[in-house]
Amino acid sequence: MAINPHFHHSDQQLKEELMVIEAAKLDPEQFGTLYEKYYKQIFNYVYQRMDSKDAAFDITGQVFLKAMTNLQKYEYKGVPFASWLYRIAHNEVMQLFRTQKNKRAINCDISDLRFICEEQETPFFEEYIPVVKKLIQELNQDDLHMVEMRFFEKRPFKEIADILDITEVNAKVRMYRIIEKLKKSISKIHV
């Protein structure tokens, strides 16, 4: 069973998932299979960006409600159903931040920050931790979202592109520009 390197799903798994989606379009009770498969992933994605677990539960519930009520509009594009759910989750989180002016949370650990330095081909030093955290917090929402997906969630560019509804090349170019911005800022403190 060959695994699609872009999504960690085999072609067979994608076909089987599509059969479940088509069944759920005819019988909403079949949506439970998709809910059970993806709930934890979507919750983690949302909670990664929130400072409240309760708010993350609420948003995740909204994501699945919207997905279920709009399932007839879902079009298979050769990628896992999760990509569509992530796009809905992204929109719901951004809507919350716009309407309630909630402060955007950034949850990461030292290994995530080390990975950013490695990607920039910059040596990682413990004293970089507060600087890198500060630089990440200062990114605009779109750039922050890219950093989270690439470095904290370890998503491939193909999946990032699908979630953001852009081309893979565009995702790589945007990430390169973000890395260059971070690299310049880190080099100012590197002696």
Image: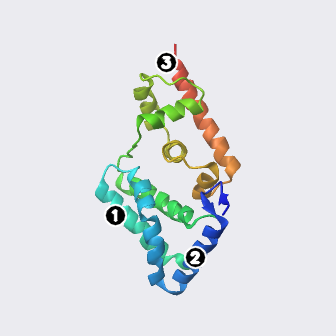
Residue occupying the far right of the picture: 169
Graded by Cα atoms within 10 Å as few (under 14), some (14 to 19) or many (20 or more), the crowding at tag 1 reads few
Q: Badges 3 and 1: C-beta atoms under 8 Å apart? A: no
Q: Is residue 35 above or below residue 160?
A: below
Q: CA distance from mark 3 to mark 2?
A: 50 Å
Give the amino acid at mark 3.
Ile
Badge 1 or badge 2: first in the primary sequence: 1
Label 3 or label 1, whichever comes before in sequence order: 1
Q: Classify 10 Å Cα crowding around label 3: few (below 14), some (14-19), many (20 and above).
A: few
Compared with residue 185, is residue 66 higher up or lower down, i.e. above or below? below
Count of numbered circles on the image: 3
Which of the two residues, 180 or 76, is positioned nearer the viewer here? 76
The answer to whether 113 is drawn above or below residue 50 in the figure is above
> Identity of the amino acid at label 2?
Lys
Residue at the spot of label 3 = 189
Residue that carries the numbered disc 1 in the rendered image: 58
> In terms of secondary structure, where does tag 2 sit?
helix
Find disc 2 in the rendering and name its residue.
Answer: 73
Amino acid residing under circle 1: Asp
